[in-house]
Image (cartoon, helix red, strand yellow):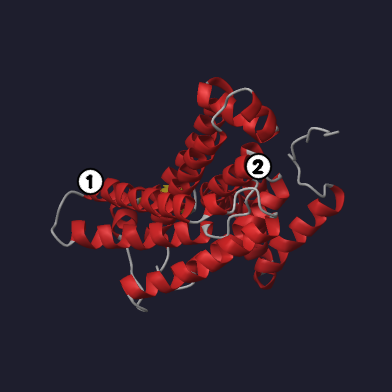
Amino acid sequence: MLTAFAIVTDGLVYAAYLFLVAVGLTLIFGVMKILNVTHGSFYAFGAYGAATAAGIWFDRGLPDAGGFLFMVLMAMAIGLVLGMVLERGILRLVYGRDEVVVVLVTYAAFLILEDVITFIWGPRSYAAYQPMVAAGSIDVGELTLSNYDIGLVVLAAAVAIIGRWALKYTRYGRLLTVVIFDRETAAAYGINVKLVYTVTFLIGAMLGALGGALMAPKISVTLGIGVEVIVLAFAVVAIGGMGSVEGALIGALIVGLARAAAVHIAPQLELFVIYAVMALVLGFRPYGLFSQIQPRKI
């Protein structure tokens, strides 16, 4: 019973982390049909920015709560600027090109940004543990749960609810839905598709950086973290269905719980189980669990 409870709690925490990273990736793909490899860079820059902000804030002995907010704002500001540079400086030049070409462009940009990280922060690792220590922990039965992890799950749930509400009930959300369904029809009805692309890419970039900032207190911020996370995010999005926020949530839950079960029961299968689940789902649903119906064009 204790093991089952540990699997559920660990699985929910890991799923929250995966969802916060993958939701921006699936949003960009749904609207722009771009498999954005630079999403891993947004995550890495967010984590490095948060670690830098933590150093600036906590070295001065300022209040803990303000430090966490400073980390998040710093990371999202970096995501905004980086997203603007990439979208306006590179991606707008390849809109309408073959999807393989666009993927290669984002991959090239990702490699360049890895070198930019080395140039700015160097090869050393950084830690931003202060918010997690300050949050403390609670005892639930025989388990000790971190309040920071509980907050991470609550925040992921809030992002999922707000994201769904925004897509369903706001004007911009309805515009996004039209563009996702058919960009040519959207343009014919007077929707500024290029503006929608830019805004969507910036939102996705800030969500990726937010994921990095929230995970910075739990990990060692070091070179290569963007590579690891982009592979996991692709697995989550592939399971849930490209372009679906609900799919990203369900995909993150499946991967999170499966990984937690493997860690507690058969640790040697930790990575294998993630991709085994993905292969199994894609075997029955090649476009993911929540793949969207595509219009038939004549």
Q: Nearer the viewer, residue 56 or 95?
A: 95
Q: Residue at x 47, y 70 (%)?
A: 112
Residue situated in front as seen by the camera: 52 or 119? 119
Amino acid under disc 1? Gly
Q: Amino acid at mark 2?
A: Gly
Q: Tell me the quarter of the picture where residue 269 sits.
A: bottom right
**Element type where label 2 sits in the image:** loop
Give the answer, above or below, for where 30 lies relative to 132.
above
Q: Residue at x 57, y 60 (%)?
A: 37
48 relative to 214, above or below: below
* Residue 68 in picture, x, y percent from top left: 29, 49
Residue 222 in view (yes/no): no
Q: Mark 1 packing: few (<14 Cα in 10 Å), some, or many (20+)?
A: few
- Residue 243: give its label: 2
Residue indicated by mark 1: 66
**Is 163 displayed left or right of 298 in the figure?**
left
Residue 205 circle label: none
Question: Is residue 195 something that shows in the picture?
Answer: yes
| Percent coordinates x, y for residue 79 in the rendering | 40, 51
Question: Which residue is pictured at 43% across the width and 56% down the height?
Answer: 212
Residue nearer the viewer, 83 or 207:
83
Circle 2 or circle 1, nearest the eye: 2
> Residue lying farthest bottom?
123
The residue tagged with tag 1: helix, strand or loop? helix
Q: Please tell me which of labels 2 and 1 falls first in the chain.
A: 1
